[in-house]
Image: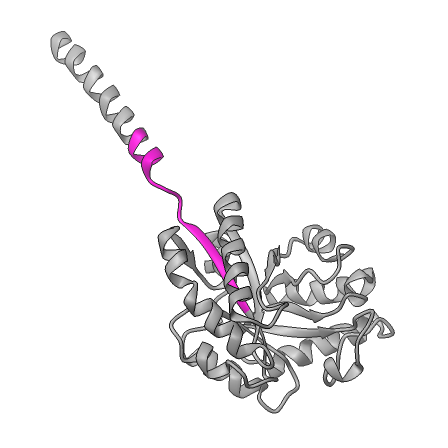
Amino acid sequence: MKKFTLILIPLLFLLIQTSALANQSEPKQLKASIIIDDFGGGTGGVRDFLEGDIPITAAVMPFTESSKDHAEWAHKNGFEVIVHLPMQPKKGKASWLGPKPITVDLSHKQVKQRVEEALKSVPYAVGMNNHMGSLAVEDEDVVRAIVEVAKERKLYLIDSGTSPKSKFPQIAKELGVPLLRRDVFLDDISSSSHVRKQMVKLAKITEINGKGIAIGHVGVTGKVCSVGIFQSMEEFKKRNIKIVPASELFAEKLTEKYFVP
């Protein structure tokens, strides 16, 4: 028995070491999300994305003629849907926001009501990100109202990064609401070659952080955005980066518990 034990202990130690080495050698799956804004509004690139095979996250503008149709189209084809919530910027035309935007002159109650109405106009939404909003995201009361609705409705938030003084990170953390911030804008210059360069930037950020988020658009830049993204997929395969819905960038248990429409 003693002899058997002496043989068994080294074998067990060897098995533990082998298992540990195997786990170390397995590369962690790198994940990136591509959020495409302005569904429900512009038409350029809409079909390319919603009939394509890249699992983009469809950010749908509320209160438009196409809000419901685009959200249902996206959901039917297996794409994750979020509300692209229009928020007041420091500069820009009011027409860019569309109807019922979130503005700093609204009361806390009014903001919450508009967010609820926006969610009703975009079926299957599991999260929200801001459309413009460089002024409104800096207003603590406005942001708190939005985050409270997200908490009540079990939604995640993406800060589109339109202001470095955004109150979203602070208040989301305080209220325990899942939030991530955009890393890269893909089509701030309207050319497919620029989109490809920005996709490479997304890949590098993802390799460093383990995850990354890019935002592109349908509409005016929709076609060049879709072309640039589709042309970049081979590069992502080479780098072993998986494109996933935005919800999959959060903890797996959180995704399963909350973000299923």
Judge whether residue 43 can be spotted in this image: yes
| Residue 234 placement: quadrant | bottom left
Going 85% across and 73% down the picture, which residue do you hit? 107
**Residue 47 at what x, y percent from top left?**
46, 83
Instruction: Please tell me whether residue 25 belongs to the stretch shown in magenta.
Output: yes
Going 64% across and 88% down the picture, which residue do you hit? 64
Instruction: Please tell me whether residue 96 belongs to the stretch shown in magenta.
Output: no
> Looking at the image, which is closer to me, 140 or 152?
140
Q: What's the magenta region?
A: 21-35
| Residue 127 placement: quadrant | bottom right
Is residue 24 shown above or below 226? Answer: above
Q: How is the image coloured?
A: one colour
Q: Quadrant of the N terminus?
A: top left
Going 46% across and 76% down the picture, which residue do you hit? 49
Residue at the far bottom: name it.
Answer: 65
**Residue 12 at what x, y percent from top left?**
22, 22
